[in-house]
Image (cartoon, helix red, strand yellow):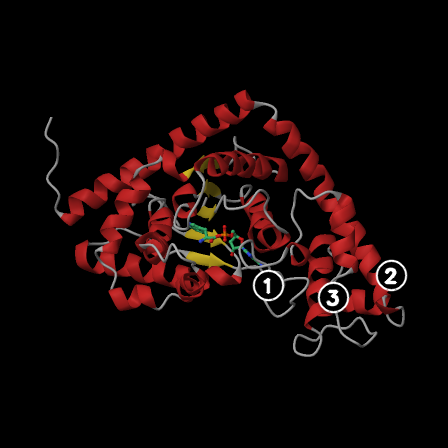
């Protein structure tokens, strides 16, 4: 089975609709057809100022949400990044292969660093994509494995980081011998960039969106409905897909279609002549129906510390096994002396 690896930051009290449609839904689907590794990336979460108690809580909520969405710890390896120190170790090695200018061209870094307040931008934020490359490449399939491939389900905003990962894999192989498989981005057509409900030209984002612009997975049905009913559309009345002229309606159509499986043209036909009201009302119902069971399961899981601990221990153990093998090869290739016996 081909491998799949993906990660998500525990930087909010809940994941949002963009995370779900752009990535997490694919995580759940791909665990059946792939040898899956899914990681809550707490090292990435400290690249911006954070509160330790909040990070600890959010990391647990993240794991609980992933389980509630259907990530199955017996089929997929679900783990926390800081439990596997090889991530930081490989990031160092890859950092030594990355050009300063190359890292400086990462658009997410440019966006995020321009928004950092008085604390300023950390070196960690600058090297963030290198750590991401290490996350993925650590889980390169074994040299002997057949059909060696590693797929990475992510939203559109991660495309450039995946390109850098491929470049670093090839560069390492070229310098030190065939070691890594360049990963393939797996970006879902139609849901790769869910936009802000209030600013339909901007990405729905934990850090940049206003509360009104973002739908949280763990949100109560009341506010969820309200936000969809108040989503920005346009002065027209037609429910039609038009990215340029009707960005708001287009975003809602994408969300509707992705969640309920009806194609966009079928939705356009269904709401022909009925205005935005009924369309939004039905969409709100679809969103509530999708997330209510996930919210309920998450809350239950959070009450069962023992089960969460077992999942974390099992995930850390399995991920460590793979990461340790990869790092052993890397150390040898790079020229580090073995420890002796
Ligand atoms: P993060 O935590 O910001 O987001 C998690 C996933 O959600 C996707 N996403 C979206 N998709 C569609 N529409 C949106 N509005 C939207 N907002 C977010 C992201 O593309 C992502 O797939 N750097 C990564 C975390 C990471 C990672 C990795 C991912 C660290 N190491 C290794 C893959 C492989 C990030 O910031 O995700």
Q: Dot 3 lies on which element?
A: helix
Tell me what residue is drawn at x 42 percent, y 67 percent.
107
Cα separation between marks 1 and 3: 13 Å
Above or below for 273 versus 146: below
Considering every residue shown, the one lying at the far bottom of the view is 245
Find residue 264 and name its label: 3
Chain-order first, disc 3 or disc 2: 3
Q: Which of 159 and 263 is in front in this view?
A: 159
List the residue tagged with mark 2: 278
- Name the secondary structure under disc 2: helix
User: Which tag, 1 or 3, sits closer to the chain's start?
Assistant: 1
Q: Residues within 10 Å of mark 2 (few under 14, many from 20)?
A: few
Compared with 164, 80 (above or below) is above
Q: Where is residue 152 in the image (x, y as percent from the top left)?
A: 46, 53
Dot 1 or dot 2: first in sequence order is: 1
Name the residue beneath numbered marker 1. 189
Q: Give the x, y percent position of residue 62.
A: 54, 39
Q: Mark 1 near ligand 1 (CB under 8 Å)?
A: no
Question: Is residue 71 something one can see in this rendering?
Answer: no
Q: Do the residues labelled 1 and 3 touch (CB within 8 Å)?
A: no
């Amino acid at each position: 089975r081909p491998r799949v690896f993906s990660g998500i930051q525990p930087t909010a009290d809940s994941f949002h609709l963009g995370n779900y449609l752009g990535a997490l839904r694919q995580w759940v689907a791909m665990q059946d057809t792939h040898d899956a590794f899914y990681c809550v990336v707490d090292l990435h979460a400290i690249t911006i100022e954070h509160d330790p108690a909040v990070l600890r809580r959010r990391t647990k909520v993240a794991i609980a949400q992933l389980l509630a969405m259907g990530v199955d710890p017996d089929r997929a390896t679900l783990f926390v990044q800081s439990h596997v120190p090889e991530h930081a170790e490989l990031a160092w090695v890859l950092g030594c292969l990355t050009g300063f200018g190359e890292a400086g061209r990462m658009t997410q870094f440019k966006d995020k660093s321009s928004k950092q307040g008085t604390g300023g931008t950390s070196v960690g934020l600058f090297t963030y994509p290198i750590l991401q490359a290490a996350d993925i490449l650590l889980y390169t399939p074994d040299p002997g494995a057949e059909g060696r491939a590693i797929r990475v389900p992510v939203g559109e905003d991660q495309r450039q980081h995946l390109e850098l990962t491929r470049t670093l894999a090839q560069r390492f192989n070229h310098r030190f011998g065939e070691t890594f498989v360049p990963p393939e981005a797996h970006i879902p057509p139609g849901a790769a960039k869910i936009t802000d409900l209030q600013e339909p030209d901007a990405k729905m984002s934990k850090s940049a969106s206003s509360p009104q612009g973002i739908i949280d997975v763990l949100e109560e049905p009341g506010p969820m409905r309200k936000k969809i009913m108040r989503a920005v559309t346009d002065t027209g009345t037609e429910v039609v897909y038009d990215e340029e002229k009707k960005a708001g309606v287009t975003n809602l159509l994408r969300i509707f279609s992705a969640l309920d499986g009806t194609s966009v043209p079928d939705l356009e036909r269904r709401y022909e002549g009925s205005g935005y009201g009924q369309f939004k009302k039905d969409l709100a119902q679809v969103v509530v129906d999708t997330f209510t069971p996930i919210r309920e399961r998450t809350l239950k899981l959070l009450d069962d510390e023992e089960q969460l601990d077992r999942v974390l221990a099992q995930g850390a153990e399995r991920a460590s096994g793979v990461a340790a093998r990869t790092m052993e090869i890397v150390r040898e290739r790079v020229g580090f002396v073995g420890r002796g016996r």
